Image (cartoon, grey):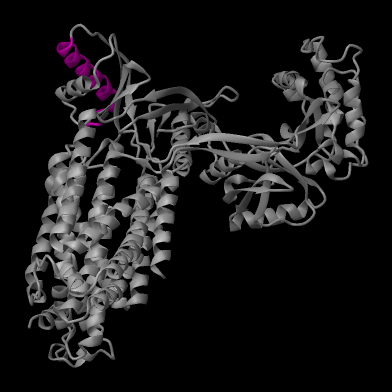
Amino acid sequence: MPPRYRVLTIVALCLASIWALFPRNETIRYRGADGLLHADTSRRIPLRKGLDLQGGIYLALEINDSKHAIPASQRGELIDRALRSVRNRIDAFGVSEPVVQKEGDRIVVEIPGIQNPERAQRLVEQQAFLQFQTTDKTHALERALPRLDQIVKQRGLATSTDTSANGQTPAAARGLQGLLTSDTSEKAGASAANKDSVAKDSLKLPTGGAFSGLLQQGGIPGQFYIQADKIPTLEKFLADSTINAALPPGKVFRPGVDSVSLQGTWYKSWYVLDAKPIITGESLKDARPRQDPTEGTTVQFELDPGGGRQFLTQTGKHLGEYMAIVLDDRVMSVAAIQGVIETHGQITMGGQSLAAAQDLALVLRAGALPVPLRVAEVHSIGPSLGQDSINQGIRAMVIAVAFVVIIMIVYYGFSGMLAVGGLALYVLYTLAVLAGFDAVLTLPGIAGFVLSIGMAVDANVLIFERIREELNRGKTVRTAIDEGFRHAMPAIVDSNVSTILTAAVLYQYGTGPVKGFAVTLIAGIAASLVTSIFVVRTFYILWLNRSRGAQTLRHLRVPTLRILHATKYDFIKHWKTAAIGTIAFILLGFGLLGVHAARHNGRALNESIEFTGGTVVQLRFAQPPNADAVRAAVDQAGFPGAEVITFGAANDYQIKVQQKAGVAAAANADSVAAQIISVFQKRAPGNSVQKQRAEAVGSSVGSELTTKAITAIIISFIVTLIYLAFRFEWRFGVAATLATMHDILTTMAFLAMMRLEISLTVVAAILTVIGYSLNDTIIIFDRVRENRKTQRKESLRDVLNRSINETLPRSVLTHMTVLAATLALLIFAGEVIRPFSWIMAFGVFTGTFSSVYVAGAILLWIEHKWPRATAAESTGPANRERRSDHLIGLSAYLTP
């Protein structure tokens, strides 16, 4: 690509990124039921702050048993089931780091920085119970109308306004009946269902009755229209128990979403349906919104194979009848069954907006609530972190980035300056991608992003080291740059593609924080590839076009600082010592886990309140206190690390404390509240405190999320193994996967030794370590693959040693940048980010260790056990002696 087009491409990406990061109004246009175009406008603010930095909204959900009483014995189980569905809905709402947990007999939802709280309430309240029911073709309601009219009259339910003055149906309604039963129904704007032919044997409705006078027959069996302002009267009748008992057995009377206008009066549809559905939404596999010029807004759905078979059978039995799609006892659409239906269908939205279709598809995919919920409380909540913690974190991140910049410029000079320019665009591009995913910035998330800057230089380091190798061989500057990029490309592509595949699996199968981590990882890798391969090379091209001869070479060679240049260490020689050391480390760590489990009632890991649950205390102060003073009082009461937030008014605070092992939740709640109040009143005697509420709160990370996370990691290992087997061979894939599993075990052992608190932030750090270690291993393996082609007479053991030594400068420098950023966070960022920083610091060590010693040793053992028939090293002296005992054979093979 010519330099001019390269520059234009970079500028275009910058402008697109700025546009993605710029707050703006977004308008969604749709055609309403009146046939006119409407528009919904909302304010889009990218990269909103999370609950820890800004706060958000608090929703408390309770079981809505206003219509049907629910036994107390069933409420707990129903809340637990509803919790899973609500969590799925909120996760699908966006990658926004929400909190969803059980609090007593409530479900609590905390959403950061949301711009449309009303939409969030609708999402969590909607039951989303989907049914497919046939309309009544037996005229059961028509036959029951005289009895219903009589009951209304006997019970005195009707008022003078419920019917027209002469007791007859209004003229407009009579005109509607004639209109709907003629061929001109389409002119009235009726729904597609009303365009079908009218039932030939429809009964004539009685006139003059208070109940029957409200109804007008529609165009299909079981359909009726009611004047819109008479709907409250009909609902009043249907709420009466005697009328309900008199309704036809085996039938239900449900409102529809479609309507029709005649002479300026609107009429709404109601349907008589068979009570037993032919299928329910439990078989739903997927649902997607769609906007069509002719059909308007719809939701396309797909059933799973079992549901498809059932649907095919049932629709075959009801050919020629009408089927209603009923959502939460409301008829969304009706269509004639003209042929068997298997797995696909659609729900027409009756002129609603595309946003409404998106929300409906979301809740359908998340699953129906097992019980209706209602929003009992809505509050705004303040940030969970104090300003001092936020300031410490930001200061540490600035120092971390400065360390990375200084290291690159000092070590690579002019090339390092080009890399720093690429890093600036890396930050811009990554933030733009995150904004596209509606990500929310939290303090640990920003810290992870800062660490990704240290990791992003890895591709540049690979390229620069390759350029140095080519210059040392006497190549010209232009040729060295071209060859450096060409030789570094396979390692960059393999390491980043394998990580992207891992992240894609985590995004597809994970949920909550795992999915959020995957989005951040994909965004960072994509931006890193663009900046290191395309942007930095463009900088080189522009520089070469403006420079000449020896001056160019001098700039590229200065400074001459080199670390571990041309080393010839025999790493494989020490495999026994490395194996003994790492096995002892893992056994010690897991032994400590057993000790911790014995001492803490089975709790081996030091899990945070996100995993264990705890106690929530709501306090009201006479005078609005300083948030830091409340945190200090909570710490002094013996609950360090508790979450303290403002809750609605400035003098209301909510405090979440981790559950103590072996202590009853209810007793712990009262005790926590008493201790905090006592300490605060001693510190500020003039400010009285009242306990508003104190009760147990469940974990915000359910077992389902944990299971999905583990499943996602296992699948990602399998995908990585397959990719490496395709790009290299299966031996390399197995070795890299087992080395990564080693890193997980050593990290768990490190957690046990340090007794670090396991939070969602620490989980993200462990996932980062996995990706970092895999990336390191693949870069070494890529050099092994290259050297095996050029050094065909060397044994695999020698090739491994050579490859590790050749990539050692890159490994050391990349680790220096990551470690410098990590240490800055560890020293300056405070307690909030410290566990994350410890894990990352250890991850740099264990990732390097496993890439050098574990992965190489495993690869050699596999080659010894299952040698390649065409491998040149199979004739080497180390491969001639094969023994049945694998460990003895490995020892003979690895020892020089």
Please tell me which residue is depicted at 58% across the width and 49% down the height of the picture.
287
Magenta-highlighted residues = 658-684
Q: Is residue 254 magenta?
A: no
Quadrant for the C terminus, please. Answer: bottom left
Residue in front for this viewpoint, 415 or 705: 415
Coordinates of residue 780 in the picture (x, y in percent): 22, 72
Residue 204: tell me if it is visible: yes
Corner quadrant of residue 643 = top left
Please tell me which residue is depicted at 16% across the width and 22% down the height of the picture.
637
**Secondary structure that dominates the magenta span:** helix
Image-based side of 370 in relation to 442, left or right: right
Residue 873 position (above or below residue 498):
below
Image-based side of 486 in relation to 93, left or right: left
Quadrant for the N terminus, please. Answer: bottom left
Residue in front for this viewpoint, 307 or 759: 759
Coordinates of residue 59 in the picture (x, y in percent): 44, 27
Please tell me which residue is depicted at 68% across the width and 53% down the height of the picture.
311
Residue 228 position (above or below residue 869):
above
Residue most extreme to the bottom: 875
Image-based side of 812 in relation to 119, left or right: left
Coordinates of residue 657 in the picture (x, y in percent): 25, 28
Corner quadrant of residue 458 = bottom left
